[in-house]
Amino acid sequence: MPSQKMSLKDLKEPKRLYPNTTLVEDGKAASVIVRPGDVRYAPLAEQVQARLLDLSGAKVPVVTDEEVDVPKKNLILLGNVNTNRVIFRLYGYNYTAADDLYPGRGGYLVQTIHDPWGNGQNAVGLFGSDFDGVRTAVERFIGGLKGGATVSVGRLFDVKFGPEALRIPKLLDEPDLATEMEGAEEALRRGEHTGLWGRIGENGLLYGLTGREVYAELYKRLVFRMYEHAMSKPDNYGGIWGFDGDFALHKVMPGWDLVEESPLLYDADRLRITRILFEFITACVPHVGDMDVDRVRHNHTTFAALALHYCGVYFHKYYNAKEADDWLALSDRCFKYQAKAFKPSEDCSGYQWLTHYHLTKYSLSTGDLTYFDNGNARRDADYSLMTTDNLGYALPYGDNASPFGWWSELPFLRAVVCMTGDGRYQWMLDKKTAVEPRWAAYEYHRRAAPVEPKDLSGTQVFPVDPLYYASNEGEKHLPLKKTFDKVVFRDGYDPEEQYLFLDGLSNGGHKHYDGNSISRITENGRIWLADCDYIQSLPKFHNGVLIFRDGQSALIPPFTELERVADFDGSGFSETTLWSYSGVDWHRNILWNRGRYFLVVDKMEAVEPGDYTFRCIWQTLGDVKAREGGWPWRRTGSSSSSRGCLARRSS
């Protein structure tokens, strides 16, 4: 790192490269072997040590991962993100994806990592998803070494994928440059979301996963084309860099840190791309928003803040840039405040989990584990379990067009499993991925023993986060202790069993006006009540009650009061109230006869004189058919609204 601060506006040459990793120099150890604390790995580390001794006469020291901070020598690393603390920190910045998914059981990865600490020291990774994989990586590495007083290696990327890794999209693809660039032109013509930056970031990370030089070439060409397009001042919605271009920057920057060492890139290419990235980053800075205002944040802010963290780290350690200090400070202010909360500004399942995962990535990359140490990460993971129905779908409260959710909760749950080893979250991950097998690299995959989360069955209440409450001026509406975020009734986790979800909020980012409405009922292996749309956010599109006073509606209150709740072995109950809603106090009572039915009783008390009309809404999904050997569900009224209710006839 340069000794004096510089401005990136004055950048005249790219960062220094260290293409060779010296393990022994002139008969003296120039590296350290770092093994996991698990004693099983000791013989593997000793194998590497013995081979280097035979080749050079130098005894390279072996230490455990707990003994290394910022290294003063090159490192030889054994294990993966779940077994070696040093690898854990490198994983956070996308230098390697080695975990329980990648390279997969029985697979291996021998990989050089270029100057990840910004001090001229490299690492050689001998990685595997299991012990056998690491052993194979060790054997392949030492088998390729050449003897002499000095032992060094150039760029290494030797990988064999196990079956789990092949779940990762595009891992075995052989992209055609001409075809990819044609696709990029079409993306620019139609104004693709994030411009070309999403493609750029993906190619950078694929280079890190595969070692294929074609991805480095694609990264370079796409950056040059995106810049040319931006400088033509296109009439793009969202600006010249592409609509929400900053959403991809948290992948673009780590991708560049990988691609930059490609032998295909000349110094002139590297300098030009670095300057382009500086311009793009500078344009993204305002997207973080005003950090002088203490409030919980939404995903648009945290996308930009996470990106600025990666950008700041890169330009601080490699260039000691003045701008990097400002970027890091903005990112820190955003996430350090958000870590105190267990809810972001979002009240929308898709966007909410994006925000949580951004905070999680920041926490695990920086090593600032406040979010985990104060219990908020576990609270949010429990919230994910509560707001997942018995079919495995995350409830689409807020802006979400699908009744099946986005699956944006998966990366967050994986990271929490990695940090806690809690089998309850693994159990839910297994349930979800059995329904929707989505997999991606760099998501902290760790396999824990699954345990059914029975503690979250019955009648459960999730409270409103105090910082969310304050950020939404809750004190103007209800005392915090009287509010609630969600109420869930769950008989168990089998799709045949009962689940009901009641919302308590009509505020937050990407909100819907759905307080006191029932977003979901599942039983008998299907969805009965659904609540899902992106645009249709008004109360008339939710499973609640429309209230008209003298023919006019009114804005729904932002918080719902939880007046009473009870949980018994065979039943449950809640009474929730919206006060002074269009001149009426609306009390919604849900009585649960566990395993049999839900009885919903809405009580309206006029608090202002007027002529009132009430309309109860039930949004069903699909066709209701009789089940063989038993009574069907029956619905009174139309599928969109009725004055009746849903009930199941008992025999």
Image (cartoon, rainbow, N blue to C red):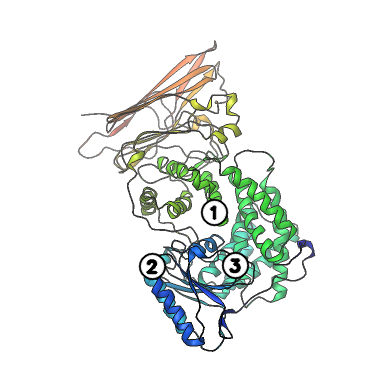
Q: Give left or right: position of 214 versus 274.
A: left
Figure quadrant of the C terminus: top left
Q: CA distance from mark 3 to mark 2?
A: 27 Å
From the viewer's perspective, is the residue at label 1 or at label 2 nearer? 2
Q: Which mark is residue 361?
A: 1
Which residue is identified by label 3?
116
Q: Nearer the viewer, residue 636 or 237?
A: 237
* Placement of 322 over or under 633, stated as above or below: below
Give how far across and how far down residue 487 sits, in percent: 42, 32
Figure quadrant of the N terminus: bottom right
Which residue is identified by label 2?
39
Question: Which type of secondary structure does the marked residue at label 1 adopt?
Answer: helix
Q: CA distance from mark 1 to mark 3?
A: 17 Å
Residue extending farthest to the bottom is 148
Which three-letter amino acid code belongs to the residue tagged 3? Answer: Pro
Kindly indicate whether the residue at mark 2 contacts the one at mark 3 (C-beta within 8 angstroms). no
**First reached walking from the N terminus: tag 3 or tag 2:** 2
Give how far across and how far down residue 498 sits, in percent: 32, 37
Q: Which mark is residue 321?
A: none
Q: CA distance from mark 1 to mark 2?
A: 29 Å
**First reached walking from the N terminus: tag 1 or tag 3:** 3
Which three-letter amino acid code belongs to the residue tagged 1? Answer: Lys
Give how far across and how far down residue 621 sits, in percent: 39, 39
Q: Give left or right: position of 386 versus 73.
A: left
